[in-house]
Image (tube, grey):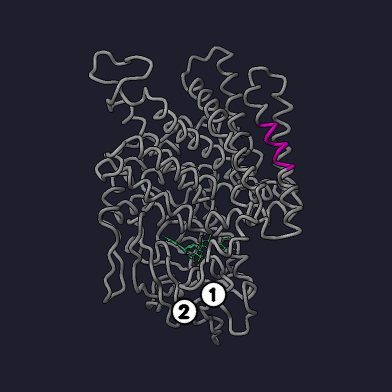
Amino acid sequence: MPAYTPPLRDMQFVLHEVLHAVDALKACPAHADADIETLNAVLEEGGKFAAEVAFPLNISGDHEGCTLDKATHEVQAPSGFKAAYQQYVAGGWPALSCDPEYGGQGLPFVVNQCFYEMLNSANQAWTMYPGLSHGAYECLHAHGTPEQKKTYLAKLVSGEWTGTMCLTEPHCGTDLGLLRSKAEPQADGSYKITGQKIFISAGEHDLTENILHLVLARLPDAPAGSKGISLFLVPKYHVQADGSLGARNPIFCSGLEHKMGIHGNATAQLMLDGATGTLVGQPNKGLQAMFVMMNAARLGVGNQSLGLTEVAYQNALAYAKDRLQMRSLSGAKAKDKPADPIIVHPDVRKMLLTAKAYAEGGRALMSYCALLLDQEINHPDEKVRKDSAELLALLTPIAKAFVSDNAWTATVMCQQVFGGHGYIKEWGMEQYVRDARINMIYEGTNTVQSLDLLGRKVLGNNGASLKKFGKLVAALVEQEGVNEKMAEFINPLAYLGEQMNKFTTEIGFKGMQNPDEVGAAAVDYLRVAGHLVFAYFFARMASVALKQIATGSQDPFYTAKLQTARFYFAKLLPETAMLMRTARAGGASLMDTEAALA
Ligand SMILES: Cc1cc2nc3c(=O)[nH]c(=O)nc-3n(C[C@H](O)[C@H](O)[C@H](O)COP(=O)(O)OP(=O)(O)OC[C@H]3O[C@@H](n4cnc5c(N)ncnc54)[C@H](O)[C@@H]3O)c2cc1C
C-alpha cells in the first residue's frame, strides 16, 4: 500500500525562501495582510485533508470506478467520494482563493495551488470534481453576466454545485472549429442547445445536487470555424428565481468511458436534447471566454502531474531503502544483511533523483505561475499586471506539457524502482503511471501545447515574451556570476539562455520559408524551454541553499537541495543538447516520407 506525506517543508522553502511570496502578495491590496504563519497554517490543514481524507480513497476509487444507471442517467462516484466531498465543502476548501463578494475566503491563488498539489498527490481522480469547478468559477467570474454571477457563483464557491467544461465532440477535439452542437435563440433570451459532447470530466456524478455545464455551441448565423463558437451555461437542474432547483434540463449522460486511468472520475458522454442555456460572454466569442477556464485547467494539469510525481517519488524512495537485492558494486554496505538495499545501486539512485528533481523543479514553476496569476489579477500597477499576464501566458504551455511529460517519466521510473512489484497492483505504483498518462493528452495534447508555445507565444510576438523571461535569467546570471560556488549552476544556465536565443531565431527563419519546420521543431523546443525554466529555478534554489550552508545552517534540507540541483544540472539538463540537435535536423526527414508512411 502506498503512503503519502505532504511536502510542507519544500513548499515553504519555495514560497518563502525562493519566491518570497508574502512580499509579492503584500504589494497587492487584496492580500495586504498576507503573512507566512497564515499561509503555512492553511497548507498544514490542507495537507491533513489530502492525506487523511482524499488519499485513503485513491486505490478503492480506482478499483471500483463510476457506475451509470442507464434508466435514470445518474452516475454514482466510487464509495466514499461523496462523503469526502461533503467534508471538503464543510471545511470551506472550495472557497479558499475565491472572491469574498461571492462567499470566498480571498486567499491567494498560490495557496490554492499548493493545496491542490497535495490533493492531486492524494487522489487525482477525486480532485478533478472540485478542480473543474474552480475553472468554471474563474470563467464565470471573468465573463458571466451580473445575473449569472448572482445565480451561480456563490454555489460554485461554496462547493454546493460543481462545474464542467464541455468542448469535445466525437469528431472534434483539438480542432474546435469543427464543432457542431447548435444553440437556437429563444424569445425569452435563453437558448436551446442540441448536440453531443464526449469525454466530459466529472460530467455526471452524485457528489452535488446540481452541475453547471459550460458548453461550446454554434448560433444559427455563426461563421464557420473557430470564429463562430459561443459559450453557454447549461445547468443540470434549472434554477428558480428564489434560488431553489427546478425542473431537470435535458442534458443527460448517455455513457461513461472505460479508460486507462483516473477511474474514480466520471468521463461522461453527454447528450443535449434542447437543453436550455444562457450565453456567457459575447456571441461567437465563446473560445475567448472558455480560454479563461482552459488556461486554469492547463495549469491544473501541470499541478496534477506535479502531485503524481511527488507521491510516486515518496513511495519509490521508501521502497528502495527497504528492498534488499544484490551487493553494491563498491563493496557491501549493509554487512549485517544478506544483501544491500537497492538504493545503493547507481541507476536506482538516478531514477529516484530524476523524480525528485522533476517534483522540486515542478513545484517551483507551478508556485511561480500561481504567484504571477495573483499579480495579474490583484497588483495595483498596470505594468506589473501586464508583465505578469505575459509571462504567465508564456509559461502555461510549459507548465502543462513539460511537467506532465516529466511526470510520465518520473512515475514510470518510480514504478521501475519496484521491479516486478511495480507492475502488479498491490503496491499502487502502476496506478500512478496509468493516472499520469492522461495529463499528456487532455487540455490540448502536449504537441498542441508546444505549437502554442513556439507558434503563438514565441514566434507570434517576435520573441518579446521569451525576452522577458530571458531578462530574469540574465539578472540572475549578473547577480550570481561573481559567486564561484554558483558557477556550476550559473554557467550552464547562461549558456543555455544564449543558445535558446539562437535556436529560436533559427527556427523562426526556417518557419518563414516552410511552416512545417515550426511543427517539426515544436515538441523539442518546448522541452528545451522547460529545461531553461527549471535550470533558472534550480539555480535560484541552489543559491538559497548555499547561503544557508555558508551561514552555518545544519539543516540537512539545504544539503539535499544542493545535491538535487547538482544532479539536475549534471544528468537532466544535458538533454537539451540532443533536443536542439534533433530540432535542427529539420522537417524533411518527417515530411519527405511518402513511401515510408504509405
Ligand atoms: C479522460 C479524458 C478526460 C477529458 N476531459 C475533457 C473535458 O472535461 N472536457 C472536454 O471538452 N474534453 C475533455 N477531454 C478531451 C481531450 O481534451 C481531447 O481528447 C484532447 O484535446 C485531444 O483531442 P482528440 O482526442 O479529439 O484528439 P485529436 O484532436 O483527434 O488529435 C489526435 C492526434 O493528432 C494530433 N494533432 C491534432 N492536431 C494537430 C496539429 N495541428 N498539429 C500536430 N498534431 C496535431 C494530436 O496531438 C493527437 O496526437 C478528455 C479526454 C479524456 C481522454
Mark whose residue sits in front, 1 or 2: 1
Question: 135 or 340, which lies in front?
Answer: 340
Marks 1/2 in contact by CB < 8 Å: the verdict is yes
Percent x, y of residue 153: 50, 62
Mark nearer the N terminus (1 vs 2):
1
Residue displayed at 31% across by 66% down: 75
Point out which mark residue 179 bears.
Answer: 1
State which region is magenta. Answer: 493-502
Dominant SS in magenta: helix
Q: Dot 2, how many residues are within 10 Å of its Cα: few (below 14), some (14-19), or many (20+)?
A: some
Q: Amino acid at mark 2?
A: Gly
Point out which mark residue 436 bears.
Answer: none
Q: Residue furthest front?
A: 595
Judging by the rendered image, the residue that carries numbered circle 2 is 195
Percent x, y of residue 308: 41, 43
326, above or below 208, in the image: above
Q: Quadrant of residue 293?
A: bottom right
In the figure, is residue 300 to the left or right of 225? left
Helix, strand or loop under label 1: loop
Q: Quadrant of the N terminus?
A: top left
Question: 38 or 557, which lies in front?
Answer: 557
Q: Is residue 185 magenta?
A: no
208, above or below 123, in the image: below
Number of numbered discs present? 2
Helix, strand or loop under label 2: strand
Is residue 203 shown to the viewer in this render?
Answer: yes
Residue displayed at 51% across by 38% down: 363
In the figure, is residue 7 to the left or right of 547? left
Residue displayed at 56% across by 71% down: 231
Percent x, y of residue 139: 56, 61
210, above or below 413, in the image: below
